[in-house]
Amino acid sequence: MGRWLVGRTLQALGTLLIVLLLLFILMRLAPGDPLSRLSDDQPLSAAEIASLRARYGLDRPIAAQLASFVGGLARGDLGASIEYGRPVSSLLAERLPATLLLGGAVLLLNFTVGIWLGVRQAVGRGAWADRWLTMLSLAGYATPSFWLGLVLAWLVGVRWRLLPAAGMHDPLLDPDAGLLTRSGDVLRHLVLPALTLSVVSIAGTMRHQRSSMIEALRLPYIVTARAKGLSEAAVTWRHAWRNAVFPVLTLFGLWLPVLVTGSVFVESVFAWPGLGSLAARAVGYRDYPLLMGTSLLVAVLVVLGSLLTDLAYAVLDPRVRLS
Amino acid sequence: MTRWTPRTVLAAPLAAWVLGPALAFWCPIPASAQSSRAPTTIVIVTGEQASLPIPTLMEGPLAAVANYEIADQLFLHLAGLGPTLTTAGDRDFVPLLAQRWVRRDSVTLAFELDPRATWQDGAPVTARDVVFTFDRARDPSIAPRLAGVLRRITAVTAEGDRRVVFHFSRPYAEQVYDAVFHVAPLPAHLLAGLSQEELRQSPFLTHPVGSGPYRWVRSVGGEYIELSANEHFFLGRPAIRRVIVRVAADADARLNLMLSGEADAMDNVPPPLANLSRVAADHDLRLIPVPSPAIGYLLFNQRDPRDSSRPHPVLADPDVRRAIVLALDRPRLVRAVMGAYAEVPFGPVSSILWIRHGAPRPLAQDVGRARHLLARGGWADHDGDGVADRDGRPLRLTLSVPNTSAIRRQLSLLVQEQLRQVGIRIEVQQYDGPMWGKRRSAGLFDIDFSAASQDPTPSGLTQSWSCAGASNVARYCDPTVDSLFERASRGGPDVADTWRAALTRIEADAPAAFMYAPLYVYAVRRRFTNVTIRPESSWLALWHWTVGPTQARKGTGN
Amino acid sequence: MTAIWDSLGRAWRTTRGRAGAVVLLAVAAASVLGPFALPDPLAQPNILGGAILPPSLGHPFGTDELSRDVLARVVSGGRVSLTVALLAVGLSVTLGALVGLVAGYFGGAVDAALMRLVDGALAVPRLFLLLLLLAVSERVPLAVLVLLIGTTGWFATSRLVRGEILRLREESYVWAAAALGANRRRIILRHLLPNAMGPLLVAATLGVGDVILLEAGLSFLGLGVQPPAPSWGGMIMDARQVLVTAPWVGIFPGLAITITVLSANLFGDALRDAVDPRGA
């Protein structure tokens, strides 16, 4: 196990490195560069463009740019964003808490409520509740997140004025207010975006959990366990669920990057100051340094998610050999 | 002892999720979320957050409206534009840092600084600050864009503490404009002697000290910037004491913040038109249309996109260009998308350019004449497929549109449909911002749906419409237009007529179909009075705004 | 091959399966035949007075911002959306199953190599990957679009399938089959694949919704169907602006997507039971 873990971690680091190098090169092959947007409404002369290209080091060969990026990375320096004129690391640090909060809330909701509902559906398969939950969850899934977000923001925020329509903090709140008031403020802002993102994505967990649970409940030894007179809850959760958890684990690993990517649409509809919208802007403006910074975070979580999933397989089902 | 079961593990977070939203409703609602907010505080909601609102540093991607608008609160210019926005001559400006200016000869201007002017740290504003700032602004290695616009200033010198003398390379009409509009003075006593690298690390960038009506308080990334009134502002203490510039990149989110009462003012209520009626229906809000520097046009490539050494196979013919302009019912299209808040411009002239006054009306739709012009060039529907053709080649053109502009995307579909009626087949091709920009500057288009944001000066037109213009991506070249531009920039009594002659010539030659010059519609809460919104920088006059008498009595100030 | 037809037949004989299939076929038929009976989905009859009209007898689904008939656009938009959804999802599910099976069954270096590849692919933003294609070619035909979406959509599916296979290959019946001398092909196709159908079919159902919206995102970048040609995803994106003031412009294409996803799900559910070797 220990050896496997070391080997697996090395693989993960290797993957990360290759992905970063690849991204760096692909980014420069993508059409348009950080300055081409500028010709939109502020015409620049060729001389000005050339001078700006030199300022941001865009005139150097890709290999030289790559070398200085890797050099900076080794020192923990991600460079400065072209679009914001500030160090990438400080931009990321500024946005990370908001994204972790929203992403964490959504992960928590999806993988608790989602699992629970999925299991209930499987147990009561074909029943009234199962059918309605199927309908509702899939309808939610087919709904674009910005759509639900706009409707909720308008209804709850504007029409009823129950919760803030956008943002993460009330800018007028006294910064010296008590912790309870301040966290209450954040919580009030969090409800709508977290709810939106969960409703449009929870179907994934529910459907996979339902499907794997239906199969698990058909296994011969579940029938045996029932025959032995174990309680229905014990049969469901202690025996069957253990056999039905793999797809959900995999899904959790796949969803882990949501912690940093959030959702571009939901963040923008609710003006949530997260990394998702920052990353989207980085792509839209070809802000190379910022794009590399956000991609680095995403890549780390993708690789970590896959590593954790494999570990969890082995822990939950000792027969699975990790070689 | 409770056994470990997955259910107990799930139960806790599940409970948290039921309780969480419940708590959110029951939690003490912060005072400010109720209507008891201080009346002298304003929350402005905008689409972008200023990241570096400091004169001479707003270059390249940082030359953004968000930066200019905050910089204009922090840093005062030598003088401002007058109500007519006239940029030519020496008179139509309003004194700010400079008390007055005198012309010594046709190439020398002396500005007298107001002795009361101070920096927000208490130091007086001196001639040295102005000289320091212009040395930076005119250095192409520091500020390539500014250095470009200030190219006709040859030297800026101090005479004592209060007098600054500007020297120009030649006589022209907009010398005062160049000296006062483009850059506001920076505090030399804080910044002189810093290298560009030291400046980048300097605390000044995160806590700028200016001479303007508002001082910097803080910036919360992705959320808002807070400013507070400069108590010692020498032109008068602002009545609005606290300014929160909140950012919401999404236009619907901005509108929601206005309609939910969380924000007090927004620039440019987003399309569609129905949103304007939603704002109008809120009795706390008022709509304020303001001339905008924007102009949108269909730019016709003069060169073959496949080989720029050759003329464009279709659009090099002025008859085809004119036919396209005549085939379009521009007022109708613009009304469908922007309602009453835009007009069809005559020539490349936004609604803030003073030369638009007295210009003739743009050509009305004339489908018959459009067909006639096409037929004269040999374009007619010979094979009966609904598309005009010549020598077996159908009249097809691509129209490239950036996906970032909802207005241009919508208009391009309307244009496509109207041109189909005269047998011109348009393929709309949308691209994301950088890609569209790249293709545009490389001349890879037949028709480009361009939009420009103009400075208040007409001399900016030479960049796009003269033969050697730096941003003349369509390679339009007409010597007559060039010589009219040249004559107009020299000034003189007939300067307005000369500009209009240039516009008339451009309209006749149709290098582009000029589609719309919009008004921006601002929304401002009614409790603010004496509200003025300046077209050249939205919140420039904020320090003149007052708070309505009835509401002011309710609060206790800040 | 006969096994597939048998399973489809068994799925068809269930109520769920038949209902799902019938609705899907009806939607497809409507999008092929509908345009002949309806107004031109591109026509803009009256851009000033006829825009964003609420549903009425003349326009059962109302009109959009350019005064076009929403019903006509929903019906003809189905061509693009359904084609892309069904073909691209079919492709990506096949690829995902293949990679997942191979990685899970063979394990070791094969597994490591394939899964690190998937990690890497997931770490690159998908839209960015597709954006790169614009550098190569600016006009992308529908077939290529399907290919693009399909070949970039299988990464998550392969991880799900591999997870199942890792578990299944340790089951006693798989060992028994191997001990009895069954060849790999038989073990994979007869024992492992049917048991991994659950995650596959769920992934396929959910993929249908994803892909329809992704197609719209790509059009927006200049890849794929360009305006004014309608597609459901594109209509929803365009309806964003008038969501609150004229909800019908977006609700009807949204309903079309939901109905498609629901009926694909019904059929998938029935198919899963039909494939299950243990029987329902």
Image (cartoon, coloured by chain):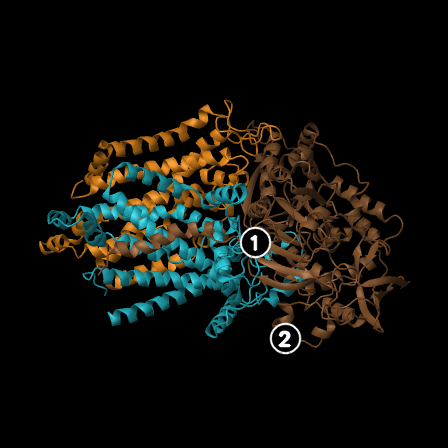
Chain colours: A cyan, B brown, C orange
What residue appears at the point 86 percent right and 60 percent down from the top-left corner? B171
Farthest left residue in view: C180
Residue B348 placed where, x, y %?
Answer: 72, 45
Which residue in the protein does label 1 denote? Answer: B31
Picture disc at residue B198: 2
Farthest top residue in view: C57
Task: For mark 1, give the secondary structure.
Answer: helix
Left or right of C14 on screen, residue C143:
right
Place residue A316 in its image quadrant.
Answer: bottom left
Q: Nearer the viewer, mark 2 or mark 1?
A: 1
Left or right of B22 on screen, residue B531:
right
What residue appears at the point 33 percent right and 52 percent down from the top-left corner? A112
Residues under numbered marks 2 and 1 in contact, where contact means CB atoms less than 8 Å apart: no
Residue B288 placed where, x, y %?
Answer: 70, 43
Task: For mark 2, give the secondary structure.
Answer: helix
- Which one is nearer the viewer's eye here, C119 or B310? C119
Q: Within 10 Å of the Cα at label 1, are there few (<14), some (14-19), or many (20+) other Cα atoms?
A: few
The amino acid at mark 2 is: Glu
